Amino acid sequence: MFGTLVSQLPIRLPAISYQAIAPEMILFGAALVVLALSATIGRREHPELYRGIGLLAALGEGAWSANLLRLVDKHGASLAIAGAIANDGFSAVVGIIVAAALVLTMLIGPGFVRSVAGQGPEFVTLLLISATGAIVMAQADDLIVIFLGLEILSIALYIMVGFRLRDGLSREAAFKYFILGGFSSAVFLYGVALVYGATGSTNLLKIGSFLSTHVLINNGVLLFGLALILVGFGFKISAVPFHVWSPDVYQGAPTSVTGYMAAMAKIAAFAALLRVLTVAFHLQLQYWRPIIIALALLSLVFGAVFALRQREIKRMLAYSSINHAGFILLGVLAATSGGIRDSLFYLGAYSVMVIGTFGLISMIQVDTGKTEGSLSLTDVRGLGQRRPAMAILLAILVLAQAGAPFTSGFIAKFSVITAVIAVNEYWIAVVAMIAAAIAVAFYLRLVLALFARDENKVGAGDALYPVPVRGGSDAGFLQPSRASQVPVWIGIWLSVAATVFFGVFPSLLLNLVGKGKIFF
Amino acid sequence: MTLLDWLIALPALGALVVPMMALPPENQRLIRYFGIAISLVELGIAIGMAVAFKLHTSSYQFVTKVHWIGAFGIDWYLGADGISLVLVLLTAVLFTIAMFAMKGVKDYRAYVGWMLLLEAACMGSFTALDLFLFFVFFELTLVPSYFLISDFGLGASGRAAIKFFVYTFAGSAFLLVGIVSLVFIHDHQTGHLTFSLPALMHTRLPKDTAILLFLAFAAAFAVKTPIFPFHTWSPDTYRSAPIPAVVILAGVMAKLGAYGLIRFNLELFPATSRELAWLMMTLGVAGILYGAIVAAGERDLGRMVAYSSLSHMGFIVLGIFAFSAEALSGSTLQMVNHGIYTAAIFLLLGMIYERRGTLDMKKLGGLQKKAPMFAAVFILVVMGMIGLPGLNGFVGEFLILIGTFITHRWWAVVAVLGVVLGAIYLLWAYQRVFHGELKDDRGFRDLAPREALLLLPLVALIVFLGVYPMPLLARINPTTSAIVHHVATAPALGSSTVSSIVTGGTK
């Protein structure tokens, strides 16, 4: 029966350009290698080996993306695999940013995750798989392929968020993220179906050319589909009003996973969003720009204001990441006229900063004897006296997130503001800068606590989030040894160094992301 | 590299070196000596610039220009004219004194490091000719001052520090949007993306845009100066910052605002400045009167000086927007004078606080009998603030009032009231603190040699500039005349024909 079907409807496989999808293959292949190795040589025996393989794969992926960028520069952009994958500067640049985020997480994360989730290969494997999904989303030139990447990325993230099995907060976070994430994926998919219904294709280029040659008398289906797609993306980037999950998930996830998620989910979702809006819907600018503006303004303002009320650092940084999402959306709203470069710059700078920030917070959590689930402002009081290096590095990264001069955070904010002004939306730029000024207040409160002169006192923050007793909810919590902290410090120093270096010499990074042009 | 590059690079390098000086506690003094040494070299460079400075020209000198961020047309572009020069001198002098004034600090590394970074940022702001570069330095001043206030301040300094940072940052928000908008308008007109001030001066702006941009720039500078009604951060900040930092905050950083008004608002938007002069002058006069009245009612010496500072900065704003060469020269000179006597008065307040642990006038009294020298220096500085002829405050205020009277008579008339009120509250304060009955039996040490040496250069400058301000005026005047000429000759805004002379008075 099946045989006759196949013979009647011959499926022609398109030519596959392995060169174009090599980044995915390197990462996914490494994930499989790690799994196979762990099955043969013992699950828990060689944690550093898994990390090493992961690091190599991330570096290899970055190098290949750089190579692709060189080839695109030389031969021009192209489509691969029946037009489903775009091999252009944009996907290569995103590939490099993904590699940077992955390398930092590989250095910082495994040591901490091992202490809560055991010595197995799961974390490294899931990191590699989720990064694969991110690259698929960046390269995808087809709504279905975007959905594929989205699911690869998201499912890996759902699992990682729930790594701290014994803690109720973590289970709640994973469950919440999974349910809401699944729901938003469904909404996204429904949007894809409606767009397909309206235009007859899921391919972004075909949608774009269909919409430029046809006038839809009743474009309600198309616009509703577009709106649903934006909702799906809004959830992934945690833009207000689709942000309610993020504080809980940021708090519940293992800290290094939080940092990774903040970076990678944004990189992937913004990359796909930029491509969808500029390739498929560039003529629908007047419809989607107001939505993006609304999302951006809401995220900017609410992210900054709600963060002010937080005493729990991880929740505060969740709102800060909502605020950052608002800033990147400013680049998106100018996507059709040069905003892509500024969004990419912001994504790159932010990813490096945020992974380093959460890495330091992991260190501080270990140092103050807290679990990965909580760290309040009162816990870090006076850290500057006990651990000056940690406090200073964290202060640099937090100030960079606030947008202090001579850090990449400043240039990032500056560049998206220029993008917004370039499309004559002056008042949005003003609102954004005022939101940044409000945001400064909570970043500074963290810095203030770090360098407070009085010693650590048990305050209200601990009553709200009681420390689980050893042997209780976080039984098996191991203090990472000094040796396992070396790669963590390397990762943190890399992140701080990149943040400061690209703040003083932004031209290098600006030129790189300037090559990230979308092919259409 | 020109002298200007070194002026910024030297303290910046110092700020990088200081955190690495991990010395045992008994050798912490060495870090302080390092800071003092750098600030002295800095003072030497500034004096060298003043000597090498060519008189009788209003063009920028010691210019240096290197590409920085090509993608946005941003250059490392520095230069100094007369106004920049005297402010650079003031900065160098006050930082040297602040470094000497540092004492009894537990963590010298952080203190000296932040001070040096702040010095680099202030020097950069006063000499940057690229708008982006200026903005970067202008913002960079916030970070070290935040840490100086919050980590070394008195009382609830953390909140004051955050208030200070957020207020000024919100002001700068408008400045950044204004700068970028102006650059893009210039880009559309000429196809040349650049942030350089001399190039942007030739941007043609429609009337509404010009007014909005003027206000955007003015917002940032009004907060920083502070100009009434954007001053609410300043009493808290001045009251809770440590003394060496407040010397810099009130002495140097307040001048950043006034400097910005001259350098950017007047030069980039001459016609709009003319048109909105009434607004700025009214705010200035309101600040003069409001500051003086509130200062008269204050019972805390620190807050009183903060409000008196608001009042005195009002004069400077008045002089800037009066558009006569005398008034603008007076304002520039008054910036220097205000820096010097504010530094001196805050040092004195710091010494009172050190001895008695309070600045509340009700708890102080009769100190003159215990410490005659202290009282003598205090009254001299207070007289300088009041504007007694022969002391430095007089020269600046007199020039401002004369210059304003020529062009905008009634504002000058009202502003004079501020001088009278100033005499009242300052003399009251002196009386309450130094005359009358002693409020407690504790002794009050007279000036120690170290303290006397700290105050000596400031007192000498107060007297010297009061008697012979020519060295500064000779360097200021060509620049201020050129700016006044630039403003006066700029074509009127937009389509409306008569509006530009609305505020003219009798020209």
Image: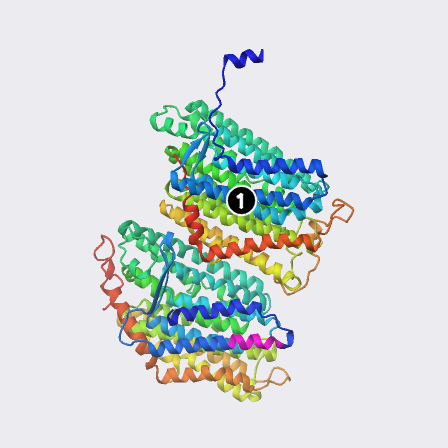
Q: Nearer the viewer, residue A76 or B34?
A: A76
Could you tell whether A402 is left or right of A487 in the image? left
Q: Quadrant of residue B465?
A: bottom left
* Magenta span of residues: B27-36
Q: Quadrant of the N terminus of chain A?
A: top right
Q: Nearer the viewer, residue A36 or B280?
A: A36
Task: Say which amino acid is labelled 1.
Answer: Ala
Q: Residue furthest right?
A: A471
Where is residue B423? Give x, y as percent: 43, 79
Colour mapping = rainbow
Q: Nearer the viewer, residue B361 or A76?
A: A76
Mark 1 chain:
A
Where is residue A306? Give x, y as percent: 56, 48
Does the stretch in magenta take in B29?
yes
Total numbered circles: 1
Q: Main secondary structure of the magenta part?
A: helix
Q: Is residue B405 visible?
A: no
Q: Is residue A484 visible?
A: yes
Does the stretch in magenta take in B262?
no
| Residue to which mark 1 is pinned | A99
Q: Is residue A219 above or below residue A20?
A: above
Where is residue A456? Give x, y as percent: 68, 60
Q: Is residue B340 above or below residue B150?
A: below
Q: Nearer the viewer, residue A238 or B436?
A: A238
Q: Residue furthest left?
A: B497
Element class at badge 1: helix
Q: Quadrant of the C terminus of chain A?
A: top left
Classed neighbour count for the residue bearing mark 1: other residues with Cα under 10 Å, few (<14), some (14–19), many (≥20): many
Q: Quadrant of residue A475?
A: top right
Where is residue B64? Give x, y as percent: 35, 66
